[in-house]
Image (tube, rainbow, N blue to C red):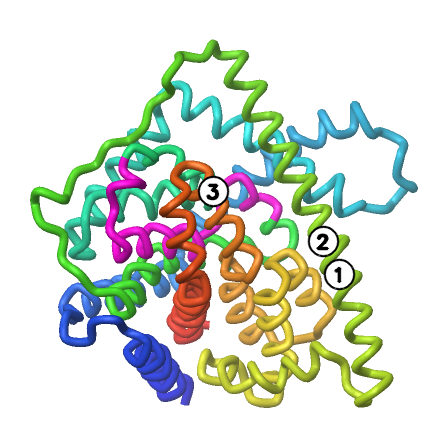
Amino acid sequence: MKFLIAILGLLVVFALSFVASNNKRGIRYRPILIMIVLQLILAFFLLNTVVGTVLIQGFSDIFTNLLTYASEGINFVFGGIANEGQAPFFLNVLLPIIFISALIGILQYIKVLPLIIRFIGLVLSKINGMGKLESYNAVASAILGQSEVFISVKKQIGLLPKHRLYTLCASAMSTVSMSIVGAYMTMIDPKYVVTALVLNLFGGFIIASILNPYKVTPEEDKLEVQEEQEKQSFFEMLGEYIMDGFKVAITVAAMLIGFVALIAMINGIFSGIFGISFQQLLGYVFAPFAFVMGVPWKEAVDAGSIMATKMVSNEFVAMLDLGKHALSPRATGIVSIFLVSFANFSSIGIIAGAVKGLHEKQGNVVARFGLKLLYGATLVSVLSATIAGVFL
């Protein structure tokens, strides 16, 4: 039965993508089919094999150790501020982002990350049928973050046509930054975080290939990655990345305070007037999508509510909400994978703002296709969750 539902889910995703395509005749089905097969193989490998389990456990252990190291610095500054036995979200989940951001800065500085990003991007470009720039950007987004990645390709931003710019922005919204992966792993099972990261990488290209198909000529297929204009010293760089990590932690904390409070208020208003909370109402709207992803129908409304919460607020709020529901292991896994991306309304502003800071005209272009950007990124999350649901 779950295989039939998975097929239905794939058909729904592809139908919704096809309807919104800006060039239906230009869709190339061969790369799409190859990437779907790769997604299925990778999902099976990560979720249903011993080797996959070992790899995920190793990845999880790395972040567990990093969070332990991060807690040394946090305890030094904030030791004794919390009541004994309690685990404040800000201290235990958000502040470790600072340490992981510093590590990413070090790996950038010693040229390890750029080498990895370029290599994986080159391999991806052979598979997805798109340009080197698009493939580089997809990998870089998963490591550097959805706004920071555009700095590395700022020389080319002003030269890109609308269709290529869309793919770059779609990749940025469909994935997540490596600096906050550790935070996710404290809230949902690490194996779902890792699986989502891998599936979203290919899913972004699959959906973009349907929504926004095009060919890149050899003359256009150039990759120029921006290097630092002025060479920073090691400690200048380290200080900058530490402060960047702190800004991310504070920004997420502020958004959580605002969104959680607003949702609570809206739920209260809806409950008082209609006898049903706003999240429950959205749950009914998103329930069919949860079902075609593989969530059992009896849990589809609760799952749909969590999915909707993620889209109207952000993934952190939704992950906190997921912890309040007693979903089955299968439903929890499917919804968890759906949540691991930046596909929400606030990301439209973040990405448009990042591009506008580098090139005002192109930033306005991004703002105009912002809703289509969110539409595509949400379909990527649905596709990844559907594929994973086959093996859960």
Kind of residue indicated by mark 1: Val
Tell me which secondary structure the magenta stretch mostly adopts: helix
Give the farthest residue toward the front: 361
Question: Start and end of the magenta stretch?
Answer: 156-183
In three-dimensional space, the C-alpha distance between marks 1 and 2, rounded to whole angstroms, equals 6 Å
Looking at the image, residue 138 sits to the left or right of residue 282; the answer is left
Kind of residue indicated by mark 2: Leu
Q: Name the element at disc 2.
A: helix
**Label 3, on which residue?**
354
**Residue sitting at 39 percent across and 82 percent down?**
9
Give the farthest residue toward the right: 83
Decide whether residue 174 is among the magenta residues.
Answer: yes
- Residue 47 visible here: no
Which quadrant would residue 6 be assigned to in this image?
bottom left
Q: Position of residue 233 (x, y in %)?
A: 47, 9
Q: Which mark is residue 256?
A: 2
- Residue in the foreground of this view, choosing between 365 and 126: 365
In three-dimensional space, the C-alpha distance between marks 1 and 3, rounded to whole angstroms, equals 25 Å
**Residue sitting at 92 percent across and 42 percent down?**
83
Query: Quick one: label 2, few (<14), some, or many (20+) residues within 10 Å?
Result: some
Q: Mark 3 or mark 2, which is nearer the start of the sequence? A: 2
Q: Which mark is residue 260?
A: 1
Q: Mark 3 or mark 1, which is nearer the start of the sequence? A: 1
Q: Name the element at disc 3.
A: helix
Total number of numbered discs in the rendering: 3
In three-dimensional space, the C-alpha distance between marks 2 and 3, rounded to whole angstroms, equals 21 Å
**Residue sitting at 70 percent across and 77 percent down?**
279
